């Protein structure tokens, strides 16, 4: 095992062994870029350090000394020399960048003797003492763990004493005194400051390794699921110092090779003359824009330009680099891929293809699919956020930002919204009867529920910003208090950011989304590259049209119950539930049927030529009724007290509703009387819905519209249930065909696979079902026995913290549990019915990692909410491209197995 | 395809082809027993009849005529002869006996001519006309579908007219007139009564076939899951008539070869002199006990004895036979295996082994394991039941009968029970806080909930009779009304039969159970024959002792939360839930820990030498608190109104409890914060429980008691959860071992497999878990997405009626869904850990068909409630014996695949 690599020896691709920083330095060295000489101690050494009970491997320091000698030779300086001392920086660097770990010690190698050598050699005593005091402070802080403020106090006292305004006003003498004081601080805390540079280096290396197991680093790794496979330890980089603080011909800077704000092709960033790197980062002095360098240091700027160009071409990614100019000589200290926002990523992808720097495939795979959602929703203007007070944080349930008056009453919200006011509906939780207010509100905020709560699901379907489970707030019918002791009163203007879960006081300006030509182009490329179909979850003609605009190839899930939530229908639907007998129920169903038919006609027209999968009624009937507690309170208030104006018949009706609501109430509604079970016990409801589909198709066929409806049954757990509904379907089809002169009407008949038993018996189901669609939300709930509304806001955060869940299984498909079950269902289904259409329509359909899973499992399509269609398209394209590339494909499949 | 078999030709084993009755007649004929000649038209002909659009196969009647001629030849009579006419009976008979189908037409072949021949030949005109009028009535009823009462009215009018007291007082002339009137009834209803015997026979055969698709028959088959594979149609048996009504040397009777009431070896049944078979069945005349035949008809009795003996030896089962003596000549008309109660089955098994008639294996396999439960519970005296009013029917949730005063208030029930009163607790539903009243009540009756509702599960655990989901009753805190308009007031004496779900007014005498020496012997044989282990679900030392008495080899499930339900602990436990901080909670947990330790010591002692699997806390914490609605009402009543006596601190406490209850309330508690999830978020609870187990073991080890505790974690869905608890377990073990001088304490650590994901990832779990136990109740709920409490009393009955569920999956393991998942879990688990102990502890552990499944899947053991231990032992033995027998084994495994 080779423990140390000189930069010219290391493999620039091997980030796992050398860390990200080390690999970058090695790579640049091999590219003959002007990197100061240095070497990397591998991450394996860090691992060995811990295996060894926290001691460095025997002989390591001897090897370090050899490498130091080589560096000295290259620089023409000497280690520990009182004349021309070699100084180094020591930097940590794991395979994955980890904030919270020790970063950098500069100027290591200085002591009371070498400082004088440095002063003499540079003819700049102030520079030498400034370097020394910096070193002592950083070493004291990082290696000895001394509170930084102790050093700052000394600096401030000295500045006051000598009337200096800034650090740079202090002269060499003052800095020498400060250095002495700093060493005293170290001594007072029980540490002798080492004078031997090698001893300094050994302590620094040990400190870097120790920082790997620092509390913050451990927490960070746990939270980000950085396992030992991914990063087994940190590397240590030892680099010969170059100095940006040697006068006006010296400088240091941090730049992006392209503008990370808009992706445009220009070097972007700041530099400082006569400064060390940390000054730029710490903001001790304000940097100048790098463009000024062109005139101030034209030669160096030319070199910077050349270097940026070369690095981009080499890495085929915009870079984020650190450089230093020492007395006119240009040095590179770090390079890494630039982090950019979604718009910049899209723009640079297109530009780099145009520049022939990357292929279209790479233009797609380099994108972070998840990030693209930024481009589709209103976002709060980031620069404005700090000006506003943050009131609370909840669960980010439906992305986008919205500002408006907080309204706590459903009817009032609906009325105000209709009148054109900007309204945010704020409730403890919501029910289907509240949906009319959803239509009129700009956003929804609740204090209860998880990502699959009623409010969340409905808001996502409508594409409205929504925050749920905001336990920081105590919401009542009249107002709301915050955990901080504040209050939101009716009409107060608030802003909610459904992408982050933050609630702010006031109205934060937002940035509007647009599909830029670049984004459109990327989506076109991705659509061509992908194999997986992408359809939309859409319940209204408007949503269908939006989805189509974003590139959806059909509707994978059209939830018919959503149509009953509009206020005119809800009344009818509730009456239907309350119907005294079947005859009355059927009369009401006839009216509902006409409404559904017209809905279907519109949606099918919007999706002409593409399949539209219509799911029959899914929720339990009691979801459409008020909850028994609320209704009981209503009855009580109607019954009596002061000035009750309720008529006798109103009271009677309220009582009947209460009785029915109580009768239908369930202990575990998630696993109760819903979906096909309602279809079996109230066949007239499903019959009406099936008829509406066939009649819509017949009407459109007459007009020559190419409609492709499919009927899908929810909550199926056995083929017996499916066959039972298939009989009704067959009857209705015959009837409608006869009524239309015998014209054949083709509507595929299929089933959701959302109950565990359906996946287990998929072979049986596939004999009747012409297609499957995995309902991964319910399937995940059933597989984990997790009621999403009960676990997400409650114990799940603790589970994530303790590392008991790799990820939220409601966001990304749990491969080892739910995924196994799905594979089984797919295999069994296609065993019975070759080439069967199988899709998914849970929310996972819009999650990139789940889309990759679906691609690899050879699903026919994913169905996602309209705003996630572009994400799904890009993720599907990435999966297809990665599968083509053998080496990366292999890597991926290996990870899958873990 | 041979359509008709003469009795001497048919294969007596082929019930599917010949029907049960036909096969029995063929078998007896081949045994040379005195069966009248006849033939069977096969069930395949019935099937062809329906395939043919309800017409008899071409040429069938010609074949029938040939067989009739053969029968005529054997009897020396002639078909349609006016001198010596052959008469026949026509009887239906499917593979499985089906009440609700057409049964029998007697005396077919009579007409106005042949009746005179019969009169002359028998020198008994009365007999001839009696036979004729019977024939016309039966034919009119069965073939023409005429209302029986029309015929009865004529009979009664004629009796009145002629002053006859009974049918037998009517003379030949009267009977001739009656026959004429009967034929007129047929004519009036639009049917011409056929005179040609062959035409009569064709109509009768057609009528039998038609009865196969009669409404009642269809419903019966659907309800009893008699599919076409099992019985494709009915056979028709045509048998030469013999007459028990030809004078005092003639008789007819129905007897059992052994007493079906107690199993004793004596011919048991009734006979009638000078009568036809239907008289005995219809109870027109009261029969004499067959023992009187010994003196009245000694020769015939001797023949009966001989025949019974021979049939038993042949069929190796007690028989239920019909016979007729015609003028001193003995005939057998039917034989079938006798249906007996559990006690008789056990006794006859032992007797037949002693008589060397059957092997021990057969003595076990002939038992109906399910039926054995009769022997372990109080049962209402069947003969007394008709005297009592039935008030309602609910779900039979815990077997046995109990009588007592209906009490609606929990505290009152507990107090009265303590005072020695017989109490039945009657509630809408129950909660853990009601459990103290369970201990003091003889039985529990609720109007809500299914078989896994709190009341049901607790009552079963205690072995107390219980009826749940009795929707016929509206129960309040003060009384109860029945759907029939009646009322049960506080203190009214009622009887509940938890084996049938019936509620009666008054106190019905019950029969006490006892383990007879015969039963003990059968259990011993079964215990030797079985391979599967049988353990008990038991939570108290008393239940443990009972289970051991019944043959349990350990405890497969000891539910620790049950221990918290006793009144002294419940208070502590609630305080612990309400604890303001961890410190206070831990103090209370210490006290609870001492109580748990002493419970464990007792149970482990009772099960010395056998494993005791202790499951840590499973239910969600809110189950121990009052429900929020009830508590809100309590707070409201404390807050105000007239004369509220609540102190300020009481009110404060009630409010805090309300707040906590609301905070903990869940939308789907079944899938919420429970089991290991509580263990993760409140580790101090599991730590206390684990410590109590180790300390109990340490204490017993010092006393030399061989205790074998195992710790089992509920609701595990991932190996991460299991590993997390395992760390606590390891810590506690080390601590307790150290506190006990380093003595090694061995407690196996395992997991429930009751969450679907656990079964899917069993390979991972088995790396940590030393044993598995399938919780098939929850696993079934998760697999079907059925909340048992919501579906069992609600839509499940409709599902069963419509044939959408083969069986209640909570009673018998659903093989194609849950079963597949279990097989997978077993395979994966044992792949990781060879020969791993895997059991089941759901209620299926006491269900015979599920026990067979467990045997076939090579489980280590089943765990059942104490009263079902004998059932499990016998079922396990049957499975082992059937597996040995290659032919039957083959049949079974074939069925499994379907």
Image: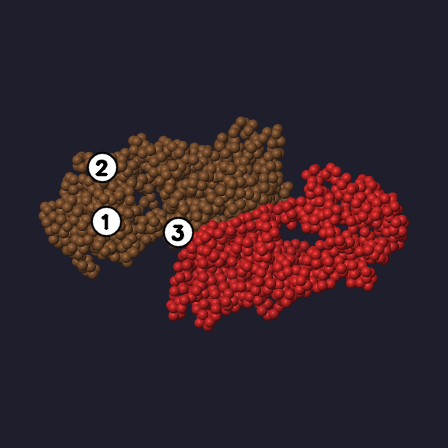
Chain colours: A red, B brown
Q: Residue at x 46, y 37 (%)?
A: B861
Residue labelled with disc 3? B800
Dot placed on the residue nearer the N-terminal end, 1 or 3: 1
- From this view, report whether residue B802 is shown above or below residue A439: above
Whole-percent x, y for residue B168 in the image:
16, 47
**Sequence-wise, which precedes: disc 2 or disc 3?**
2
The residue located at (51%, 41%) in the rendering is B831
Q: Chain of mark 3?
A: B
**Mark 2 — residue?**
B307
**Nearer to us: label 2 or label 1:** 1
| Residue assigned mark 1 | B4
Give me the C-alpha separation between circle 2 and circle 3: 43 Å
Residues at marks 2 and 1 on the same chain: yes
Q: Chain of mark 1?
A: B
Residue B203's x, y, as percent?
Answer: 21, 55
Q: Nearer the viewer, residue B64 or B562?
A: B64
């Amino acid at each position: 095992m080779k423990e140390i690599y000189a930069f010219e020896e290391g493999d620039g691709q091997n980030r796992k062994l050398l860390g990200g920083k080390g690999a970058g330095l090695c790579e640049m060295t091999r590219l003959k870029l002007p990197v100061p000489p240095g070497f990397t101690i591998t991450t394996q050494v860090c691992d060995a350090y811990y295996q060894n009970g926290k001691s460095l491997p025997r002989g390591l320091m001897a090897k370090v000394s050899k490498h130091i000698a080589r560096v000295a030779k290259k620089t023409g300086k000497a280690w520990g020399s009182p004349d021309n001392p070699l100084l180094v920086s020591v930097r940590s660097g794991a395979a994955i960048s980890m904030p919270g770990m020790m970063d950098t010690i500069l100027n290591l190698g200085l002591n009371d003797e070498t400082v004088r050598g440095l002063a003499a050699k540079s003819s700049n005593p102030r520079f030498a003492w400034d370097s020394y005091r910096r070193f002592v402070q950083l070493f004291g802080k990082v290696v000895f763990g001394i509170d930084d403020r102790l050093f700052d106090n000394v600096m401030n006292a000295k500045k006051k004493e000598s009337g200096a305004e800034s650090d740079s006003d202090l002269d060499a003498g003052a800095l020498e005194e400060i250095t002495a004081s700093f060493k005293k601080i170290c001594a007072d805390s029980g540490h002798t400051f080492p004078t031997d540079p090698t001893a300094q280096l050994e302590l620094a290396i040990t400190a870097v390794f120790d920082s790997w197991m620092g509390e913050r680093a451990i927490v960070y790794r746990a939270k980000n699921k950085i396992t030992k496979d991914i990063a087994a330890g940190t590397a240590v980089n030892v680099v010969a110092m170059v100095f940006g603080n040697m006068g006006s011909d010296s400088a240091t800077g941090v730049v992006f090779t392209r503008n990370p704000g808009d992706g445009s092709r220009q070097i972007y960033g700041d530099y400082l003359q006569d400064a060390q790197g940390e000054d730029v980062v710490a903001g001790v002095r304000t940097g100048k824009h790098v463009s000024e360098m062109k005139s101030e240091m034209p030669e160096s700027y030319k070199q910077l330009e050349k270097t940026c160009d070369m690095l981009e071409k080499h890495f085929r990614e915009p870079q984020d680099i650190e450089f230093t100019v020492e007395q006119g000589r240009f040095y590179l200290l770090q390079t890494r891929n630039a982090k950019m926002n979604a718009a910049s990523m899209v723009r640079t992808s297109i530009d780099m293809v145009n520049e022939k720097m990357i292929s279209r495939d790479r233009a797609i795979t380099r994108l972070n699919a998840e990030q693209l959602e930024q481009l589709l929703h209103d976002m709060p203007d980031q620069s404005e956020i700090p000006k506003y007070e943050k009131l609370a944080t909840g669960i980010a349930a439906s992305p986008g930002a919205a500002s408006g008056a907080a309204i706590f009453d459903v009817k009032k919200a609906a009325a105000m919204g209709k009148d054109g006011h900007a309204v945010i509906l704020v409730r403890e939780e919501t029910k289907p009867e509240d949906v009319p207010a959803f239509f009129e509100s700009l956003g929804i905020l609740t204090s209860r529920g998880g990502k699959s709560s009623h409010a969340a699901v409905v808001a996502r379907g409508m594409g409205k910003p929504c925050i749920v489970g905001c336990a920081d707030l105590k919401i009542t019918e009249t107002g709301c208090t915050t955990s901080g002791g504040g209050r939101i009163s009716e009409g107060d203007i608030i802003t909610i950011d459904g992408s982050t879960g933050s609630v702010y006081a006031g109205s934060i300006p937002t940035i509007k989304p647009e599909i830029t030509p670049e984004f459109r182009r990327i989506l076109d490329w991705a659509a061509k590259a992908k194999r997986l179909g992408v359809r939309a979850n859409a319940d209204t003609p408007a949503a269908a049209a939006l989805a189509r605009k974003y590139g959806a190839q059909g509707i994978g899930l059209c939830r018919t119950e959503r149509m009953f939530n509009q206020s005119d229908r809800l009344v009818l639907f509730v009456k239907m539930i309350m119907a005294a007998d079947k005859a009355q129920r059927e009369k009401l169903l006839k009216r509902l049927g006409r409404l559904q038919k017209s809905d279907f006609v519109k949606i099918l027209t919007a999706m002409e030529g593409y399949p539209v999968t219509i799911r029959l009624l899914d929720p339990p009937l009691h979801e459409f009724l008020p909850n028994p507690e609320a209704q009981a309170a209503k009855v009580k208030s109607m019954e009596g007290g002061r000035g009750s104006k309720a008529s006798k018949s109103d009271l009677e009706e309220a009582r009947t509703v209460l009785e029915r609501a109580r009768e239908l109430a369930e202990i575990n509604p998630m696993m109760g009387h819903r979906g096909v079970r309602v279809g079996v016990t109230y066949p007239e409801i499903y019959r009406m819905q099936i008829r509406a589909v066939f009649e819509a198709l017949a009407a459109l066929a007459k007009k020559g519209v190419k409609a492709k409806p499919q009927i899908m049954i929810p909550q199926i757990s056995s083929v017996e249930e499916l066959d039972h509904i298939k009989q009704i379907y067959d009857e209705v089809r015959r009837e409608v065909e006869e009524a239309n002169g015998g014209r054949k009407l083709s509507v595929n008949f299929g089933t959701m696979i959302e109950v565990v038993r359906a996946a287990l018996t998929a072979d049986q189901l596939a004999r009747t079902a012409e297609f499957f669609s995995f309902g991964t939300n319910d399937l995940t709930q059933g597989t984990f026995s997790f009621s999403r509304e009960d676990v997400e806001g409650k114990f799940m955060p603790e589970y994530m913290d303790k590392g008991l869940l790799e990820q939220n299984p409601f966001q990304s498909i749990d491969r080892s549990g739910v995924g196994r079950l799905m594979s089984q269902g797919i295999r069994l289904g296609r065993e019975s019915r070759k080439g069967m259409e199988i899709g998914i329509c849970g929310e996972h359909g819009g999650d990139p990692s789940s889309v990759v899973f679906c691609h690899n499992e050879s699903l026919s399509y994913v169905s996602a909410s309209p705003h996630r269609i572009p994400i799904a398209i890009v993720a599907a394209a990435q999966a297809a491209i990665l599968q083509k590339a053998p080496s990366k494909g292999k890597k991926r499949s290996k990870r899958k197995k873990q």
